[in-house]
Image: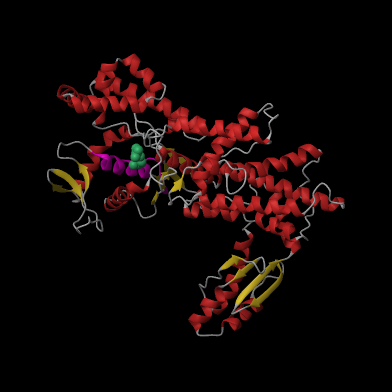
Amino acid sequence: MPDLRGLLEERLRVAFDRIEPGTDPQVRPSDHADFQANGALALARRLGRNPREVAAEVVASAELDDVCRSVEVSGPGFVNLSVSEEFLSGQLAAVADDDRLGVPCSPEPTTVVVDYSGPNVAKEMHVGHLRSTIIGDGLCRVLEFLGHRTVRENHVGDWGTPFGMLIEHLLDVGEKEAVHELSVGDLDTFYRQARASFDAEESFRERARRRVVLLQSGDEETLRLWHVLVAESVRYFDEVYRQLDVLLTPEDVVGESFYNAMLPGVVEDLQAEGLLVESDGALCVFPEGFVNRHGDPLPLIVQKSDEGFGYAATDLAAIRDRVERIGAGVILYVVGAPQAQHLEMCFSVARMAGWLPLGTEAVHVTFGNVLGGDRKMFKSRSGTTVKLADLLSEGVERADAALAEREPDGGGPGRTEVARAVGIGAVKYADLATDRVRDYVFDWDRMLAFEGDTGPYLQYAHARIRSIFRRSGAAPPPPDTPIVLDQPAERALGLALLGYSEAVELTVDTWSPSRLCTYLFSLATAYTTFYETCPVLQAADPALRDSRLALCSLTARVLAHGLGLLGITAPERM
Ligand code: ARG
C-alpha cells in the first residue's frame, strides 16, 4: 500500500509521461486542497508552452476518479487535488487492520552495518557519544522494522599507545582499586591520573613505552591487564546503555583490537595494488581529491614511521571485514562531524583498493554539537565533560518533579517507570528532533516541557488517548468501523494518519530520525485540534462516536509505534 502522496504521484506520473517522459509531478501537501502538483510549471517552461494548458492536459488524462473528489487547475498552472472521503476512509480502515500501520517492508532488503556509539576504554563517554548512540539506535530500529538485516557494531576505542600508560597506572593504583574505580564509572579520574603521571615522570613514561611494546607483542600478563581495563569499561558502558534504553549489548562490541590481526594484510594488499607511498617514513595512500589548505595532497597514514598501525588502518580493515565477512550492502557511520574527512578518505581508499565494491554504500551519518546555554560546547559547571550517567539520572529526576507538579497526589504505582520514560524520552527526543547536522542547545526546561515539539508532549498525547478508553470503558472500535471525515479537523487527522509510511521512508532516505519526529509532532498537533473541536465520547450519533473513537485509537497506535522506532517508550498513563 503506497502512501497517499505517493499514490497520487504515481497516477500523475503516468499522465505527465504522456506529455514528456521523466517529469516529476511534484506532489506536495497543500493549503488549498489536500495536495497540489506543481510539475506542470517546470514542464511548460521546458516545452515553451502555456502552463495552465499543460496542467489541464494532465488533469484530463490522469486516472484519479477512484481517489479524488476534485481535481482542478488553479493559479498559474498548479493542480489541486482533494481526495474523496470514501477513499480516505477505505485507506484508514486498511491501516487500522494492518499490524505495520500501512508501512510496507522494503522491497529491497539488504544488510546494513551500523557503526555507532564508539566510546573509548577508560574514558568517560561524552555528549558526542550520546548523540551517536541515540541517532544510531533510532536508525537501527527503523531499518529493522523495514526488514533489513541490521548489524550493530560498537567500534570501541580499545587499542593503541595510551594503553601503555593506562596499564602502568592500573598497576600503580593496584588492580583491585582500579577495577573498583572503573566499575563505578570513574573513568575520567582514572585517565587523568594516568596522564598526569605520564606527563610528570620520565620513569613512568619509560614504563608506559615498554608496556606498549609488551602489549603489541602479545605478552600474556599485559594482555590480561589490558583485558581488565576493557571489560570494566564495557561493563560500565553497558550500564549507560541500559539506562538509555538502547539496543546495544556487549555482544555488539567490535572494538579496534578486533582488527589487529588484519592490519598487516591491509598494508600488504595496498602495497600489492601499488597504492602505498612512503612519506617521512610513514606508509600512506593519497586518495584523489583530498588536499590541505595549501592545496597539497593529503595522506591517509596507514602505517606510522614507528611501524605502528593507526586509526585509519583499523577503519580500512573494518570496511573489508564488513563487506567480506558480514556482507554489508550499506555501512552507516554515525560519527561526529570532526571525523568527516577521515571517514571520506577511508571510503575513498577502500574503493581504490576494491574493498568497497560499487554496489556497497558507505555513508557518514554526521551530526552537530551539543551546546550549553552559553552556546559553547556543553560542559558541566566545573568545566569538565558531563558524565552521561549523571545527566540521564538528572533527566529522570526532573521528569519526576514535573509529573509531581502536574499531579501532586499522583505518584501511584508505575510512577517511577513513567518518570524514567519521560526523562529519558525527553533527552532522546530533543536530540533526534533537531536536524542531525545542526548543533543544538541542551536545555532541560525546553526538552521537558509538556507543550511544543518535545518528547513529553508526544507521550502525553498518546497517554491522553489511552485514558479516554480507560475512563469510558469503550473498546477500541474494530478496524472496519466506517470513518466519517466531515469536519476539517477529522479530515486533517485522517490525512496525517495516512502519512506514516512516507515519514518512515523519508527517515531512511535521509538517514535522519528528525523526519520521523517532524511527522509525529504534526500528527499529535492534528490530533489536538481534532480533540478540541470534535466531541468524541459526547458525540450524539453512535456511528459518529465510533468513527471518532477509531480515529483516536489509530492515532494512539501510530504515536506509540513511531516513538518506539525512535527508542522512546510511550507510557499508558502519565
Ligand atoms: N572511538 C571514536 C571516538 O570516540 C569513535 C569511533 C567511530 N567509528 C569508527 N569506525 N571510526 O571518537
The x and y percentages for residue 283 are 17, 45
Q: Which quarter shows the N terminus?
A: bottom right
Left or right: 197 as drawn, with respect to 487? left
Residue 574 visible, this angle: no
**How many tags in the picture?**
0
Residue 387 sits in quarter: top left
Residue nearest the viewer, comparing 492 with 246: 492
Left or right: 442 as drawn, with respect to 298? right
Query: Residue most toward the left?
Result: 280
Looking at the picture, does residue 349 appear above or below residue 6?
above
Magenta range is 310-330
The x and y percentages for residue 392 are 50, 33
Q: How is the image coloured?
A: secondary structure
Predominant SS along the magenta part: helix
Question: What residue is shown at x 38% (from left), y 18% (from top)?
Answer: 180
Left or right: 140 as drawn, with respect to 62? left
Left or right: 346 as drawn, with respect to 441? left
Q: Is residue 317 magenta?
A: yes
Question: What residue is shown at x 48% (from left), y 52% (from top)?
Answer: 435
- Quarter of the rendered image showing ligand 1: top left
The x and y percentages for residue 416 are 61, 28
Looking at the picture, does residue 556 appear above or below residue 572?
below
Residue nearest the viewer, comparing 99 with 431: 431
Question: What residue is shown at x 77% (from left), y 48% (from top)?
Answer: 549
Q: Is residue 461 magenta?
A: no
Q: Which quarter shows the C terminus?
A: top right
Residue 400 visible, this angle: yes
Residue nearest the viewer, comparing 103 with 291: 291
Looking at the picture, does residue 108 appear above or below residue 406?
below
